Structure formats: structure tokens, C-alpha cells
């Protein structure tokens, strides 16, 4: 087998074609990776929005608990004062 002249136009064209194929394959792989990252980012955004909505629902449902506890404590104090006053 003989080595071809590096300045031979046919050899240069073949090498450029190989480089082009390698670059196209690399770009296709990068495009696929970027598409996957965008998909995962969209899923994360949807999941975050879902968690925010669930947290808002929990916060809205929690406020009566503190009010009920305060009313119960006040009622307990009133009953204790009433019993002390009636003795």
C-alpha cells in the first residue's frame, strides 16, 4: 500500500468529507442531548408548578387550625376563671 500525497486534491476532498461526517454525527449527538435537557427542564418546571399549587392548598387549609387552637385555649381560660370565681 502506498501513501498518497497530502496535497493531492482527491485526498484532501476525501479527508474533508470524513471530517464533515464526523462533525454532522457530533452535532446530531449534541442536538439529541440538548433536546433531552430541554425535555427534563420542562418536566422539572411542571413538577415545580404542581408542588407550588399543592403547597398553596396546604397553606390555605392550615389557617383554621391556629384559630381553633386559640379559641379552645380562650374557652379553657374562661372556664377556669369562672370556676375560680364561683368558689
Image (tube, rainbow, N blue to C red):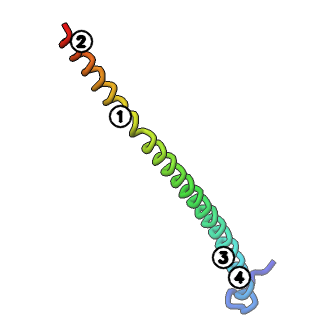
Q: Are marks 2 and 4 in contact (CB under 8 Å)?
A: no
**Image mark for residue 83:** 2
* Marks 1/3: CA–CA distance: 64 Å
**Image mark for residue 66:** 1
* Marks 3/4: CA–CA distance: 12 Å
Residue 56 in sight here? yes
Dividing the picture into quarters, in which one does residue 44 lie? bottom right
The mark that comes first in sequence, 2 or 1, is: 1
Residue at figure coordinates x 37%, y 31% from the top left: 68
Secondary structure at badge 3 equals helix
Residue at figure coordinates x 43%, y 43% from the top left: 59
* Marks 4/1: CA–CA distance: 76 Å
Q: Residue furthest right?
A: 1
Q: Count residues near mark 4 (Cα–Cα under 10 Å), then give few for <14, some for 14-19, many for 20+.
A: few
Q: Are marks 4 and 1 in contact (CB under 8 Å)?
A: no
Residue 28 on image: x %, y %: 68, 71
**Image mark for residue 15:** 4
**Mark 3 — residue?**
23
Residue 38 on image: x %, y %: 59, 64
The mark that comes first in sequence, 1 or 3, is: 3
Say which of 3 and 13 sits in front: 13
Closest to the camera, between mark 3 and mark 4, is 3
* Marks 2/4: CA–CA distance: 101 Å
Dividing the picture into quarters, in which one does residue 37 lie? bottom right
Secondary structure at badge 1 equals helix
Secondary structure at badge 4 equals helix
* Marks 2/1: CA–CA distance: 26 Å
* Marks 3/2: CA–CA distance: 89 Å
Residue 55 on image: x %, y %: 47, 46
The mark that comes first in sequence, 4 or 1, is: 4
Amino acid at each position: 500500500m502506498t501513501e498518497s500525497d497530502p496535497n493531492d486534491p482527491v485526498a484532501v476532498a476525501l479527508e474533508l468529507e470524513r471530517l464533515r461526517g464526523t462533525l454532522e454525527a457530533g452535532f446530531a449527538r449534541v442536538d439529541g442531548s440538548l433536546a433531552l435537557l430541554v425535555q427534563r427542564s420542562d418536566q422539572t418546571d411542571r413538577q415545580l408548578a404542581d408542588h407550588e399549587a399543592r403547597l398553596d392548598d396546604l397553606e390555605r387549609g392550615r389557617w383554621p387550625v391556629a384559630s381553633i387552637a386559640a379559641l379552645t385555649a380562650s374557652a379553657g381560660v374562661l372556664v377556669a376563671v369562672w370556676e375560680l370565681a364561683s368558689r
